Image (cartoon, rainbow, N blue to C red):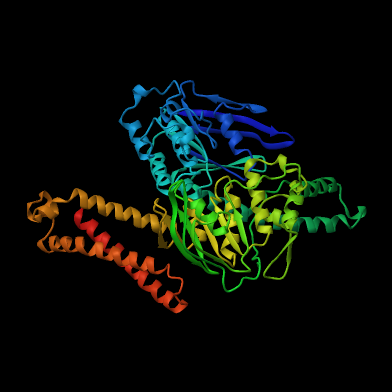
Amino acid sequence: MNLISISGISSIKGDRILFEDVSFGIQEGEKVALVGVNGCGKSTLLNIIADLDEPEKGGIARNKDIVVSILNQNPVFDPEDTISVHIFRNPEITQGTLEVSIRAILDRLGIDDLDMRMVELSGGMRKKVALAQALVKDFDLLILDEPTNHLDIETIVWLENYLKNSNKAVLMVTHDRYFLDAICTSIYEINGSKIFHYKGNYDFYLRKKAEHENSQIVEDERIKTILRREVAWLSRGPRARTTKSKDRVENVRNMMEREKIEEDGKIDFKVTGRRMGKKILEISDITFSWDDSPLIDKFSYGFKRDTRIGIMGENGSGKTTLLDLITGRLKAKSGDYDIGINTVFGYFDQNSEELPTDLRLIDYVKSKGEVLRTADGFDLTASQMLEKFLFDSSTHYLPIEKLSGGERRRLYLVAVLMQNPNFLIFDEPTNDLDIKTLSVLEDFLISFNGPLVVVSHDRYFLDRTVDTLLISNGDGTFESFVGNASDWLSKRTMSKKISQTKDTSSAAVVKPRHQEENSTKLTYAQRLRLVELEKLIPQKEQDVEQFEKAFSDTSLNPEKLSELSVKYEKAKADLESLMEEYMELEI
């Protein structure tokens, strides 16, 4: 059943055409994503579809019985409302309907005290409350604008599975590429004020878009050949032309004036960067607290040139505080902080500085740095850096006030990089940045020759840019994990399965295996092996944890570190093998 039909709609903001003559429909149960660069009109289109905004042209036909639920990018709330009042403010949702399914959603999101006031909640918890409010409504179409912003990884994975298994239609804008790939069955890209449809998930979209751009390049080369031949013909003069010359001239003009599809901006340079000394930053046993509540407890780390760390944890667990301590924005209550004389931080924080809205883009970026020297010896100007990060040359002399929120974040990113730091710090960089910009930033960071520390819950971004994780335990301490976010999540998921299996099969310890109902499924040797595995797995988990703790030793030389890495990878592989064997026998 068709839920919504969008027919020839256009939107113009000021002197900018966001999109024009857009038409498509959303079917019952369809999972749809809108993608495109910041400022292209994704959120505007969502609001038009949700009947919160009006198009300049065109219309929308909605099924008369359709119920729409929406999660805005920046949810509005009354600070004095309790969580309960906020969630059930919608007349279509009453507290009398607080059935098992609704309570399960609230519990899974960690919302158990419904009497807390909204003003008392962290930004991440407010986002969870807004998400709960959107999910508990009995909707036909769920509209989500950047749903993963400020959510921890485990909540993102839960939401991913929840939506994937739901039979309700979903329309979303998100930068989370794993999230997109797992859920979406249809993708619409806004590009150059037009919309392009790809029937498939994010991986399918990438492959088809690449094929299309490759064919476009081939077509451009073919047309260039024809144009060269036609120009040569035209240059012969009137006597060489036949009566059909007008058609040929018109054909050439059409070829020259044809609309071209812009290729995605790709960063293809490596910045030389400032000179870095032998000592970069040594932190020993630093402690920090607010109102006697410890946020950071005896944290130590030695940052080297090749340090690439991702920091994860729940909201309010001290991640941003740790970044502020690393960069010197905050002073530790105790402990030692020893920074190298040549260390220069580039800090892309969550809020960005207050941008001078009356200043032009190019002037603002130049105020941070005129040029960057590449490894090939070329100087990249402020204008070239803006173009690398997807600001078309036509926008360079616009005042900053003309930019969308996402475009301002992208501009601030360029300004941070133009200062040519040799130690990069990023706090939730994927919030408010579009996928194209993230891809450009990831390529830049991969080639960056210096320490990198990132706070993020974006698995894709972390997988591409870091090789070690620090996971907040919520008590001021951090657990070290060598590997990327997907590795950590996989290990955590497997550990939970093992724990749950042990809990549900605790009778195995209390009574002999032969007394269990399923004992006939296992041979005597298999039952003995199962008991043995229950002892081996905890031992191997301890081995892995010991290796992970050993990596935090900053005195390790490269040879010892390499040897340790080999043993660590073997221990992880052994543990995974034991877990798989245990699951097969137990199931």
- Location of the N terminus by quadrant is top left
Residue at left offset 61%, top offset 72%:
277
Residue at left offset 67%, top offset 70%:
375
Q: Is residue 127 above or below residue 322?
A: above
Residue 28 seen in the figure:
no
Place of residue 70 in the rendered image (x, y in percent of width and height, measured from the top left): 50, 31
| Residue in the foreground of this view, choosing between 196 and 131 | 131
Image quadrant where residue 377 sits: bottom right
Whether residue 158 sits left or right of residue 211 in the image: it is left
Place of residue 221 in the rendered image (x, y in percent of width and height, measured from the top left): 70, 58
| Residue in the foreground of this view, choosing between 239 and 382 | 382
Residue at left offset 39%, top offset 30%:
115
Total labels: the figure holds 0
Whether residue 27 sits left or right of residue 422 in the image: it is left
Whether residue 137 sits left or right of residue 445 in the image: it is left
Residue 32 seen in the figure:
yes
Image quadrant where residue 168 sits: top left
Place of residue 583 in the rendered image (x, y in percent of width and height, measured from the top left): 24, 56
Place of residue 551 in the rendered image (x, y in percent of width and height, measured from the top left): 41, 68
In the picture as drawn, the residue positioned furthest to the bottom comes out as: 559
Residue at left offset 46%, top offset 77%:
557
Q: Is residue 266 above or below residue 145?
A: below
Whether residue 75 sits left or right of residue 531 in the image: it is right
